[in-house]
Image: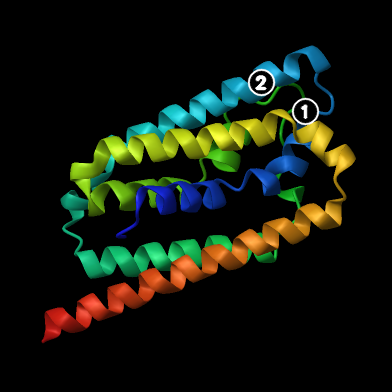
């Protein structure tokens, strides 16, 4: 996954998908006292950030343990991003979280999987494993993407009231299309690398 710093920030922001998480945050925090909502969002964001930064530093070791090659990483990363992009374009409802206990959410489902979902974790691992010498760069990319996501999530309730739901859905689908292009590029690079290995 040979991405520039800016590209990494963009991909991570798209995978975190804060706009797509707005309905979930508004729904799950609807019964929480208004004064505590900001603290809960910030707390869940901190948990997710710590988890993702842990994967930045552990990613190379995890993949080295399994002996995965560069082409396989590119293809796997492309497939993961493609599936995430499809979820953004054809987003399911939030009914999967209907059975959660009432009251303040803790870790699940806001920190994980809403912010730091499997796709986000996999993306961070792939970044760190493909270029371990750029670990500080990836750390900064995760931090910037997460800060941008926090800004969106802190204003989730206001955005849900002031921005038409169809407009939010349209923006998210546009993000999904952009992410699809990144995913296809990664798969093509993986296939090209595999062909070179065979040659």
Q: 10 Å neighbourhood of mark 2: few (<14), some, or many (≥20)?
A: many
| Mark number displayed over residue 180 | none
Q: Residue at x 31, y 39 (%)?
A: 137
Left or right: residue 199 compared with residue 190? left
Residue 70 position in % (x across, y down): 21, 64
Q: Looking at the image, do the residues carrying marks 2 and 1 touch, with CB atoms under 8 Å apart?
A: yes
Viewer can see residue 99: no
For the N terminus, the image quarter is: bottom left
User: Which residue is located at x 53 percent, y 51 percent?
Assistant: 15
Give above or below for 42 relative to 68.
above
Q: Nearer the viewer, residue 178 or 101?
A: 178
Question: Label for residue 40?
Answer: 2
Give the side of residue 80 with respect to residue 54, left or right.
right
Q: Nearer the viewer, residue 26 or 158?
A: 158
- In what element is the residue under mark 1? loop
In the image, residue 117 sits, relative to residue 193, either above or below, namely above
Please report the residue visible at 89 percent of the width from the left and 38 percent of the height from the top: 161
Task: Give the mark nearest the N terminus, 2 or 1.
Answer: 1
Q: Position of residue 34 (x, y in %)?
A: 82, 17
Q: Residues within 10 Å of mark 1 (few under 14, many from 20)?
A: many
Quadrant assignment, res 73: bottom left
In the displayed structure image, the side of residue 172 where residue 70 appears, left or right: left
Up the image or down, 40 lies above or below 4; here it is above
Query: Is residue 4 in view?
Result: yes
Q: Residue furthest left?
A: 199
Quadrant including the C terminus: bottom left
Q: Which mark is residue 29?
A: 1
């Amino acid at each position: 996954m040979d991405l520039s710093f800016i590209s990494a920030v963009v991909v991570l922001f798209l995978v975190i998908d804060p706009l797509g998480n707005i309905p979930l945050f508004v729904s799950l925090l609807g019964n929480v006292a208004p004064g505590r909502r900001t603290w809960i969002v910030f707390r869940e964001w901190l948990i997710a950030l710590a988890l993702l930064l842990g994967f930045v530093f552990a990613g190379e070791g995890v993949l080295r343990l399994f002996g995965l090659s560069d082409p396989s990483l590119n293809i796997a990363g492309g497939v993961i991003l493609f599936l995430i992009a499809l979820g953004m374009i054809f987003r399911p409802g939030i009914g999967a979280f209907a059975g959660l206990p009432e009251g303040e959410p803790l870790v699940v489902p806001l920190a994980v999987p809403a912010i730091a979902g499997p796709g986000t974790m996999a993306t961070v691992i792939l970044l760190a494993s493909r270029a371990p010498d750029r670990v500080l760069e990836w750390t900064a990319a995760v931090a910037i993407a997460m800060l941008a996501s926090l800004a969106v999530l802190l204003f989730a309730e206001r955005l849900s009231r002031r921005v038409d739901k169809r407009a939010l859905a349209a923006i998210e689908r546009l993000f999904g299309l952009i992410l699809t292009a990144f995913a296809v590029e990664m798969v093509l690079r993986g296939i090209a690398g595999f062909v070179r290995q065979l040659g």
